[in-house]
């Protein structure tokens, strides 16, 4: 069996789970500047307070998993992306502690609101920048990163950073649509609408720019007949965009978030198609990066057994906290 | 600012700084999570409302500390790659899966049930809530299991071979996980976490008793804490002794540094104090008890004890750091035993809550567990130097190709952010601890609608 490929898929699932789940946590913070009322912000935060830690754990699995099964990729990517990784970690600190600190003080509440917003912004931007830097390719000599200190910083990577910020805002807004009511919900519909349109524009731009700028990616997408199957992706993009906008317009509560996830899934698939079979683009393939089979198997046994259990109790937590967060419920009596 | 240091030193300093902060939170949350499970269990069994009050009191503190533990932990899991990339490439196939198991068996479990524990009291009923608390407590212990297995493998590697790419590969997973120093380290660390929390709880109880010795909640806290001190502190000294004997077997250079033994000798002395001097290979200003080290380490006064002279200079750990950190830890261990005994005597005399001196001493001991934990880890980690993987991979060969400016920048950022953010968190925790546990209100859950959204089971502060 091809354990490396199985693990590449599992790590992708983990990263996607992270993006899908922590995406709305981060997105809520990114929307704070447009939601100024303190009671609204309390409700927004309480929609995610019971689940954010679990959501973030997918990031730990992504990182820890990479170390376990693709140690070479981990040890090249981390130094290559040193600054954005550190920035992301610091950003996650500021936003993570805000969940608790904010309710511990009246005087400094504003400070922790700011910490929540700015921390999330830095984390989201850094994630987008890393994504862009991977698409650009990473230079390697002798099992070590050999590019420059600022290779990750280009107009393209910055654009990807902004795109991820917008994407998370869209996820946050559609999540709020599902979890709130009244004025807060109305405002979330509006935020969802604008961020969805901006996000689709960003996706379209990246999809057109990359094949233009990069012959490898152009070949991947435009080789007839091998690439024909891939053309389903842009068609799906149009369908999902229309579905998302329509469900926002018709004020369906649960659907926009799911459509939004569809957009992310598509972008994710596009990303995978553009870098496959590399894990460190253009330098190290997933097979070259893989740890010995013995390590892959050892962890796989656990993952196969434990992931379903994790899904079950995580699902249970979401189920316990299902439904609307009601501002009148007196959650801080 | 950092002209005189090289990139390697800065990377080591950064790792030490961030892990030293991180370990404070798990040491605390491992202990508090178990304490909360005990409190809730006792409440369900006895229905004594004071347990419910204490649960609500400590769960607020737990929530803040846990948040800090999580964010500082995420930093750790990425730092192996950012700053120790050669180490990650080579040792990843061995330690990576262990940390993978930590995520799958511990972190998800804690995070999954934390939400229910903090916000779900009114949604799931008492029994399920207790189950959630238990799962969080179990999760913290499982987390310690895996990460200490990782660390112990770096101290006493076993069950491995090398491949052509220069990576460590595993020949026997059981030997890797249960490597020779692991059982001792796990036992010693878990006890350390429980003791640390016992003394924090004791200090909070003492603080409120000093203001009002009839405070029922404070009495309960103090009494529980002092039982722990009486029973667990001596146990910890015993386990520490075994731990040291095991280290003597596998990492003799570390023990030589701990004891300040530059020379191999029979009837080796135990240095109570002194200044180890690596240049002259002597302990200056020594205050020593002849023969006692031979007795402790070999259980025979005439036995020969290995000194650093048996090892080439380039394999010596920094002696003075290890020597002093060890004395700080052991000194605190002795004080903890004394506190336990003293409280036992007062308890027998029926005066546990009346002796102001004991209460003040407990207050002083409050933060000492943390000091001992950090000192102990400095012994372990600095004592392992100059190796990352003992005897196999040198620290100097393990670092990432990051230049000095880069590491200096991230190090400064970490220092500023950590002091700011964790300083604020500590302030909130201390303020909470200063509030009176007897005044914690217990809401009536019967009046809540079951569909109600997440209620913080704790209130806002002014
Ligand atoms: C409350 C905390 C605490 C207390 C009171 C003690 N220790 Fe400790 N000690 C630790 C907390 C700790 C620790 C932080 O948990 C360490 C670091 C790594 C480890 O496994 O435990 C440690 C390490 C450590 C080591 C290093 C082993 C190695 O690295 O190979 C030795 C030999 C001892 N301890 C021995 C003792 C003795 C003889 C003690 C009694 C007087 C003692 N410790 C009290
Ligand atoms: C249990 C998990 C731990 C692991 C896997 C781990 C691993 C490491 C690694 C990879 C390094 C860098 C390489 C080196 O300098 O040898 C290091 C250094 C260090 N660690 Fe740990 N560590 C752990 C726990 C701790 C804790 C809890 C502390 C608490 C203070 C600590 C203190 C230090 C110090 C002081 C150094 C620097 C040593 C030196 O370079 O002189 N470690 N550790
Ligand atoms: C260098 C070594 C270490 C790494 C890489 C590491 C990694 C992490 C990570 C990623 C988290 C966050 C988990 C989450 O999202 O819920 C975390 C939290 C935690 N870590 Fe560490 N850790 C290290 C050292 C230690 C040590 C030495 C212990 C204890 C023996 C420990 C025990 C815990 C516990 C109990 C938590 C749960 C959160 C909390 O209770 O604060 N870790 N750690």
Image (cartoon, coloured by chain):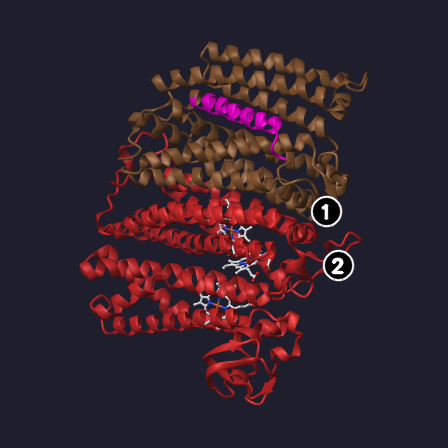
Chain colours: A brown, B red
Depth order, front residue of A300/B420: B420
Q: Mark 1 highlights which residue?
A: A291
Stretch in magenta: A152-176
Task: Name the element at disc 2.
Answer: strand
The C terminus of chain B sits in image quarter = top left
Location of mark 2 (residue): B161
Label 2 CA crowd tier, 10 Å (few <14, some 14–19, many 20+) = few
Q: Residues within 10 Å of mark 1 (few under 14, many from 20)?
A: many
On screen, residue A299 versus residue B28, left or right, reads right
Q: Is residue B14 above or below residue A59?
A: below
B179, above or below A180, in the image: below
Residue extending furthest toward the right: A225
Rendered location of residue B28, percent (x, y): 41, 55
Toward the viewer: A313 or B103?
A: B103
Q: Which secondary structure dominates the residues rendered in magenta?
A: helix
Q: Hey, which quadrant is residue A106 in on the image? A: top left
Q: Nearer the viewer, residue B105 or B40?
A: B105
Q: Is residue B228 left or right of residue B84?
A: left
Q: Is residue A259 covered in magenta? A: no
Spot the residue most to the bottom.
B302
């Amino acid at each position: 069996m091809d354990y490396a490929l199985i693990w590449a898929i599992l790590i992708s699932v983990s990263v996607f789970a992270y993006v899908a789940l922590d995406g709305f946590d981060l997105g809520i913070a990114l929307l704070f500047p447009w939601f100024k009322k303190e009671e609204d912000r309390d409700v927004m935060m309480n929609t995610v307070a019971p689940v954010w830690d679990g959501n973030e754990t997918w990031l730990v699995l992504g990182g820890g998993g990479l170390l376990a099964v693709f140690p070479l990729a981990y040890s090249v990517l981390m130094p290559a992306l040193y600054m954005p990784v550190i920035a992301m970690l610091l950003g996650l600190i500021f936003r993570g502690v805000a969940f608790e600190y904010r309710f511990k003080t009246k005087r400094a509440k504003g400070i922790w609101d700011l910490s929540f917003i700015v921390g999330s912004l830095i984390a989201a931007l850094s994630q987008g920048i890393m994504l862009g830097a991977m698409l650009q390719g990473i230079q390697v000599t002798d099992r070590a990163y050999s590019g420059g200190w600022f290779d990750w910083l280009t107009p393209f990577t910055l654009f990807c950073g902004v795109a991820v910020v917008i994407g998370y805002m869209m996820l946050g807004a559609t999540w709020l649509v599902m979890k709130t009511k009244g004025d807060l919900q109305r405002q979330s519909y509006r935020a969802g609408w604008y961020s969805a349109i901006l996000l689709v524009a960003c996706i379209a731009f990246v999809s057109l720019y990359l094949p233009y700028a990069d012959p490898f990616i152009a070949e991947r997408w435009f080789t007839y007949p091998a690439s024909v199957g891939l053309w389903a992706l842009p068609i799906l993009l149009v369908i999902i965009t229309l579905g998302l906008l329509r469900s926002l317009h018709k004020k369906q509560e649960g659907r926009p978030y799911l459509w939004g996830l569809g957009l992310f899934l598509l972008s994710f698939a596009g990303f995978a198609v553009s870098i496959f079979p590399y894990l460190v683009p253009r330098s190290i393939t997933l097979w070259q990066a893989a740890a010995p089979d013995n390590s892959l198997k050892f962890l796989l046994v656990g993952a196969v057994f434990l992931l379903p259990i994790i899904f079950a109790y995580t699902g249970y937590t979401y189920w316990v906290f299902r439904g609307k967060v009601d501002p009148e419920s007196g959650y801080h009596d | 600012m950092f002209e005189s240091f090289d990139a390697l030193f800065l990377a080591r300093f950064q790792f030490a700084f961030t892990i030293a902060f991180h370990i404070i939170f798990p040491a605390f949350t491992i202990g508090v999570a178990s304490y909360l499970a005990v409190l809730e269990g006792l409440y369900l069994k006895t229905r004594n409302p004071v347990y419910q009050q204490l649960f609500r009191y400590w769960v607020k503190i737990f929530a803040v500390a846990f948040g800090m533990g999580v964010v500082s932990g995420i930093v750790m899991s990425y730092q192996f790659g950012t700053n120790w990339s050669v180490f990650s490439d080579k040792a990843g196939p061995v330690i990576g899966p262990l940390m993978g198991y930590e995520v799958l068996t511990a972190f998800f479990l804690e995070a999954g049930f934390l939400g229910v524990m903090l916000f779900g009291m009114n949604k799931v009923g008492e029994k399920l809530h207790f189950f959630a608390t238990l799962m969080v407590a179990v999760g913290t212990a499982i987390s310690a299991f895996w990460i200490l297995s990782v660390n112990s493998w770096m101290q006493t590697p076993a069950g491995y071979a090398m491949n052509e790419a220069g990576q460590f590969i595993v020949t026997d997973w059981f030997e890797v996980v249960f490597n020779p120093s692991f059982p001792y380290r796990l036992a010693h660390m878990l006890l350390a976490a429980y003791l640390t929390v016992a003394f924090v709880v004791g200090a909070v109880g003492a603080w409120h008793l000093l203001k009002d010795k009839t405070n029922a909640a404070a009495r309960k806290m103090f009494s529980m804490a002092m039982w722990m001190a009486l029973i667990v502190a001596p146990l910890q000294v015993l386990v520490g002794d075994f731990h040291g004997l095991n280290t003597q077997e596998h990492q003799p250079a570390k023990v030589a540094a701990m004891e300040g033994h530059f020379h191999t000798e029979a009837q080796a002395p135990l240095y109570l104090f002194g200044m180890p001097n690596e240049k002259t290979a002597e302990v200056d200003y020594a205050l020593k008890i002849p023969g006692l080290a031979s007795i402790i380490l070999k259980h025979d006064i005439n036995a020969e004890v290995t000194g650093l002279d048996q090892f080439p200079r380039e394999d010596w750990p920094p002696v003075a750091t290890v020597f002093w950190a060890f004395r700080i830890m052991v000194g605190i261990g002795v004080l903890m035993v004394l506190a336990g005994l003293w409280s036992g005597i007062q308890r027998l005399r029926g005066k546990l809550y009346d002796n102001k001196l004991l209460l003040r001493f407990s207050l002083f001991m409050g933060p000492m567990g943390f000091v001992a934990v950090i000192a102990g880890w400095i012994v372990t980690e600095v004592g392992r130097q100059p190796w990352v993987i003992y005897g196999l991979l040198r620290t100097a060969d393990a670092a990432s190709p990051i230049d000095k400016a880069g590491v200096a920048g991230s190090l400064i950022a970490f220092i500023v952010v950590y002091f700011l953010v964790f300083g604020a968190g500590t302030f909130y925790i201390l303020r909470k601890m200063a509030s009176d546990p007897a005044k914690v209100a217990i809401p009536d859950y019967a009046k809540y609608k079951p569909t109600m959204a997440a209620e913080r089971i704790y209130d806002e502060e002014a």
